[in-house]
Image: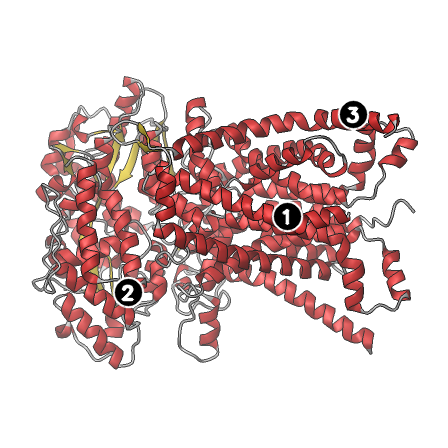
Amino acid sequence: MRIRLSTIWSWLALAVVVIWTLLPIYWFLKNSLLTPDEIARFPQPLYPLEPTPAAFFNIFGFEYEMADGLVRRGSGQANQIIRGLGNSLIVSAVVTVVTLFVVLPLAYVFARLDFPHKNKLLFAILLAVALPPVSTLIPFYAMYVRLGLSGTLVGLIIVTLTITIPFVTWMLIGYFRNLPQVERLARIDGFSRFETFVKIIVPLGRSGVAVAAVIAFLFSWNEYTYALLLVNGTTANTLPTAISGFLFQHPEPSHLAAAVVLTMVPPALVAFFLQRHIAEMNLVDPVR
Amino acid sequence: MSAAQRTAELSNLRFSLLLALPVLVFLLLVVAYPLGYALWMSLHEISFFGGYKATFVGAENFSDVIDDRKFKKSLWITVRFTLESVALAMVIGLLIALVLNRKMRFAGLVRTIVILPWCISLYGTGVIFSNLAKGQTGIGTAIAYALGFDEAVNVVNRQWVIEVLAVGNAWNMAPLVAFFLLANLKTIPSRLYDLAAIDRMSRLETFLNVTLPPLRFTLFVFTCITTVLSMKLFDFIFVLSGGGPGTASSTLTYRIYKESFKDLDLGYGAAMSFMLLALILGTTLLLYAFWGRREARSI
Amino acid sequence: MKLRATAMAVAGSLMLMSGAALAESGLEAQSGETVFFRGWQYKTDIVQDNVDRYNNEQGGNVDYATVTGDYPAIMEQNLMAGAELDVLYANPSQAGRYFDGGWIMPAEALPNIDAIKADMYPNILDAWSYKGQLLGLSYFVSTRGVMHVNLEKYYELGYSDADFPADWDALYDQLYEMRDKGLDQPFLPHWINEWYGISWGFDFEVMNRGGQVAHPDTHAPLLTTDADGAAYKTLEDWKRIWNDGLVPEEVLTYNESSYIDAYASGRYVFSPQQLYDLETFNREDRSQIAGHASLLPYQGQSWGLLDSAVYLMTSRERSDAQTDDVKRFASWYGYQDQTGNVFVGNRWMQESMLFSGYKSVMESDAAAERMKSALAREQDIAAVLGVYAATPYPKGIWSVVWAEEFNSWLKETLQEFLQDDGDIVETIEAINEEIVDLNKKYGL
């Protein structure tokens, strides 16, 4: 009896979690399948009455002929979307790789070793985390205009690294602290410090590393504030600023929704592959 | 102190420097420059129009900010928004982590679904929640009409807009919290649960004595992280409410944006940025002093 | 498909009329450099298609993209930074400031400027001229704040065309009648959260009621605090309908799309909207009130204000050859193409009933045909032209360097006025003071 009750509870909890997660997404993304006149209805239909994939064609610049012969024209922002997709992929991939290379040792050092001035340096990282983009926007902008970096991918990558590095470091510190104390054992086994880190700590902290990668990827994939000012309207435009074009002025809610679906695909794929690391890892007391 | 320990310490330092120094230098450059520039701006009155002009005004911008009625209002809005966001994100994140930590079928699928909100940009989250919460397009209205009422349900109003923002923000951040807590939960040796069962601990006792302790440091870190994220949040608010209705959701970030980018009063905006920075650092340090230090010691 | 065929036919007939005039045109791009063309998001598919046509037929190298967010502010930053930007959209309220900032090259630089000016309506030419120079070429002209009426709902409530309110006072009275008949929120006011939102709503209501915010030449403040003054009555009525809950609070957070979608859903009877959106609201595939979207005619009081936009050319550093290409493209896009047809202007009229500053577009048969098909009823054409002809232009607060600064301040002040139940006289005084301060700041 008790077991069955707890099973019901856990299924219920799972259902609540899934609904909490999916309901807002569903409510918006159904717009991508609605026709403009369905969107203009009040109240909005609970589900698409005549679902049409037109918007997904339109945002890439293709026209789509509806069943009634009406042609939905391709969006004039298709060039931006396609270019933005490419740019976003480049920026995110580079930022993720660089962040991982840089952050893993940094977090490890701060989490596991004691050295002088550690707290002051930690504070410097905290400061970097705390800086609000709205306040550093102007200085960066001024600096970039002078260095010729505004409107370039390199510029955007650098500025994104200033967000991801401190942040991911800060997150990983807590995680590395919780790993079992294996350094001494590794020493005894004849590993150097560097080997200990590369061959033992990193594999041991796989799941943390995976999550760190996801976070770095998502931060750069979704970065909007800097992109709004630094690359908006240039050839280095990324996807978030490109799709925000669907929001203003002329209503194209279905295009906007379709474009948001598009922005979710790569992160969802990344998340799907990386979350398995956590699942596969039954890290049970390696020191036993 | 033995000689062996001394060498270990030295090499600790060297090893740490080797790994950390290049990054720290990079950070210093890209962080110190904007910070210095902002400080300089905050001490000047800057105008771009009709040729760039910067007049030194000392601390005038800062004293003006302190006297500014709108600044005080924004400060309060930021505090309220942050408190609600953090509380929601932490509790929901913990619950999600506990749900995910159970053995279940389709675990991979569920995990992928659960992390979705964090995959959506804050820009996208803003659009999604504005669509969800407004009376015209919202789900509340649709359900109300489906149930036979004929009144729009709108929560993007003066009373509730901050709560709408906080829920949206928590929705976006909770998966992040959950996944880190989950990673930590996985490091809890299962034999501890076996021991707890032998000791006939209740569920609550098991949770408090076995599950929670290893999570506490992560909880602290993420309370800080969500606090910082919420306080510096801008794009989401910009998209969802534009600081409105009226100024009902003008957080400090929105106010800084408005002063700096719409009214182009860069010096004033920079001075306000420092107030926000002080608020963020102050809160984080307080959190550390009252909570983090204890957790750090206990490990 | 059919639309395009019509547009082509129109293009053909016009070509015959004004053909050879630009035989020496030479609109073909020469430098091989990219021309950067930026604007806000309005029917970007059409814009891209137009640009493609230029690039294909005239060997152009025009890069078109949109800029999102607070358009005037972001554009100003781009201009300041000398960003890659050659041709851009602007409202006249920004154009003057950009000119004073030294960032734009007035349309006077074009070789065929005399022909362009001759084709422009004098009042439009005046609105787009600043310090004696024509700043840009015609994108569109419209009346923003035309009082749209949803006939279906209006008739349902037992009214007929004879009951159409003649002015703002009568409109507000009718809103209360409607509430008594059971419609709680009959009105969607122009209080949206765009840079042209609530502040413009105030500007046009004051002007419609016969007031002036600032003097057209000296820019001195003109609002009065007496209870019969236009500003006082405007704020008094706003406060009344807000406090009585006759309008939805969420309108304060709307952007343009939400504003259009909300009215298109048919919930409201009246809403001050863009003149050309009559076309949108009468489209079956976009709107729930298609065939019922009409407007209040001119009955002695104007509605709305003259909303317009121009294509500006920047004066950023670039080679002379490239600057010549910029002029060629601007001229092709903003006036006549290589065949002497105002191609883009005519196309906007056909696509969305956007009015143009050019007589050759407005007075064509095709334009008259298009208006007829875009409107709910035959008599609405006369109503559209009547309201349009009477539309005022707020020169005092727009043709001035501080226009957008004032606008942004006014937006927040008015939002707070409603939400904090502000004092009417104090608010009006604050507006006047702000104008005095701005004049002082810029030495006017």
Instruction: Please tell me whether mark 2 or mark 1 is closer to you in this view.
Output: 1
Residue in the foreground of this view, choosing between C368 and A271? A271
Query: Residue B173, image x and y in percent?
Result: 59, 53
What residue is disc 2 on?
C421
Label annotation for residue C39: none
Q: Which kind of residue does numbered mark 1 sit on?
A: Ala
**Chain letter behind tag 3:** B
What residue is disc 3 on?
B10
Instruction: Please tell me whether mark 2 or mark 3 is closer to you in this view.
Output: 3
Res C230 → quadrant? bottom left
Inter-mark Cα distance, 2 to 3: 67 Å
Query: Residue C232, image x and y in percent?
Result: 16, 62
Inter-mark Cα distance, 1 to 3: 29 Å
Q: Which kind of residue does numbered mark 2 sit on?
A: Asp
Task: Describe the element under mark 3 as helix, strand or loop.
Answer: helix
**Chain letter behind tag 2:** C
Q: Is residue B50 above or below residue C69?
A: above
Res C205 → quadrant? bottom left
Task: Describe the element under mark 2 as helix, strand or loop.
Answer: loop
Query: Residue C202, image x and y in percent?
Result: 21, 56
Q: Which kind of residue does numbered mark 3 sit on?
A: Leu
Residues marked 2 and 3, same chain? no
Scheme of colours in the image = secondary structure
